[in-house]
Image (cartoon, rainbow, N blue to C red):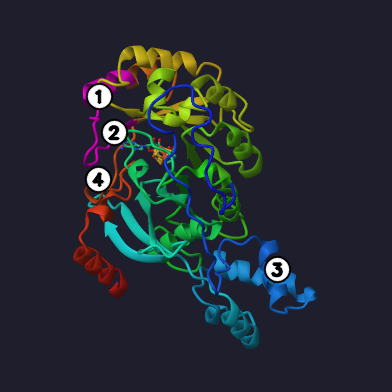
Amino acid sequence: MSMTDTLTHSTEAHSGAGAPLEKIALETYVPLAKPSLIGLSRAEISDALGGIGVAPAQRKMRVQQLWHWIYVRGAQNFADMTSISKEMRSTLEAHFTVARPEVVAEQISSDGTRKWLLRLPSGDSVEKAHEVECVYIPETDRGTLCVSSQVGCTLTCSFCHTGTQRLVRNLTAGEIVGQIMVARDRLNDWADRETPTGSRLVTNVVMMGMGEPLYNFEAVRDALLIVSDNEGIGISRRRITLSTSGVVPNIARTGDEIGVMLAISLHAVRDELRDELVPLNRKYPIAELLQACRDYPGSSNARRITFEYVMLKGVNDSLDDARLLVKLLKGIHAKINLIPFNPWPGTRYECSDWDQIEKFSEYIFNAGYSSPVRTPRGRDILAACGQLKSETEKLSARERQALRAMAMTD
Ligand code: SAH
Ligand code: SF4
């Protein structure tokens, strides 16, 4: 779906009654006067250079130089790009930027998780700019960045706080790549800078922040192709996971055109319940979704699809549910990721009791599936799954201003 498309397909395929599957039209994105080169493909950078009079014979070399400075070295302005002639640098400066989304707040959890609040230009002249969040989760053997694909989400999963947000806009490819750039900037994690371990800190990317990535397919694809480009940021496709609530028509495209690991937000094993938890199920029910998983290009024993399952007390956490889950996943190269429900103000759900989560997990494990329970990270800064955006909505204007000032003096 392109940036300017409006979602009008919200209700046509409903089989059940109830709340609409999607809530509002998407806002449109208005390009900046002086565009950032971040998020453009090599061909697009080449065209942009053509547009400012760079001779065709020079363009390939300039693109290579720019790509290296932007995506390997993390240059934040053209002046630092010392292998490019001074004259060329000032021409570039006059027409473009290498700007990332603006960091308005940074929060660090007691467990080392970091959350950045990023401000993006708003499309129409709405009273305030849009904001998204992006979360860095350090672990002993990896560092995972949880990236957003939309401001808010048009879908309305009943247990997800992002789904309650009113404003929605698709992010551009540049804004998606920009989140990884911001994390590398803030963590001092570019190629020529010292890191404590000598290796990179951001090693993995999960498209599990705000938004439904497969409702912003082209931008997500273009961004992930840049992130996995091995002459640039170089995070391999096997270390990138895209999570979807089940936009069936775009699942095969994800395998074919992006080639990243797939995660499915399943959460329920019967259509009746899934219709309620993940309303998109009314359009693409479980059987269709699982068929798309069976057919997922590139899935194998070594490249399993992750099935996410949020543990909701008394709703989907019985051993009958576990049994049916195992039965449904037969024949799919699958692993199961149990997510303890993260509550948010006003939610009607509770997290399952720990002993129930353990029983559920044990059943799945005994049936031959790896079934790690996802440890909630960054709870003290509301950075856990499904909680994004809640903190900022709760802060007063004064608190927000203080956070902003903090981020700027840092
Ligand atoms: N829109 C995509 C990706 C973002 S959500 C999707 O739905 O897959 C990332 C994961 O967090 C999804 O599995 C989502 O269902 C889950 N999630 C949402 N709200 C949650 C909550 N309050 N507690 C635990 N997990 C939640
Ligand atoms: Fe959107 Fe995913 Fe939240 Fe559902 S769970 S409302 S698809 S972000």
Q: Residue at x 57, y 70 (%)?
A: 69
Type of amino acid at the residue the image marks with label 4:
Arg
Type of amino acid at the residue the image marks with label 3:
Ser
Asked if one can make out residue 240 in the rendered structure from this viewpoint, the answer is no
Q: CA distance from mark 1 to mark 3?
A: 54 Å
Q: Which secondary structure, mark 4?
A: helix
Q: CA distance from mark 2 to mark 4?
A: 12 Å
Does the closest atom of ligand 1 sit within 8 Å of the Cβ of label 2?
Answer: yes
Name the residue tied to disc 4.
Answer: 379
Residue 288, disc: none
**Eyeballing the image, is 281 above or below 233?**
above
Question: Does residue 151 appear left or right of residue 6 in this picture?
Answer: left
Name the residue tied to disc 1.
Answer: 313
- How far across and how far down the image is residue 43, in percent? 70, 62
- Choose mark 1 or mark 4, whichever is in front: 1
- How far across and how far down the image is residue 362, in percent? 33, 18
Q: Residue at x 53, y 57 (%)?
A: 172
Q: Which secondary structure, mark 3?
A: helix
Name the residue tied to disc 2.
Answer: 341
- How far across and how far down the image is residue 63, in percent? 68, 69
Q: CA distance from mark 1 to mark 2?
A: 9 Å
Question: Does residue 195 appear left or right of residue 315 in this picture?
Answer: right
In primary-sequence order, the first of circles 1 and 3 is 3
Residue 46, disc: 3
In primary-sequence order, the first of circles 3 and 4 is 3
Magenta-highlighted residues: 339-360
Label 1 close to label 2 by CB (< 8 Å): yes
Between residues 43 and 246, which one lies in front from this camera angle? 246
Q: CA distance from mark 3 to mark 4?
A: 44 Å
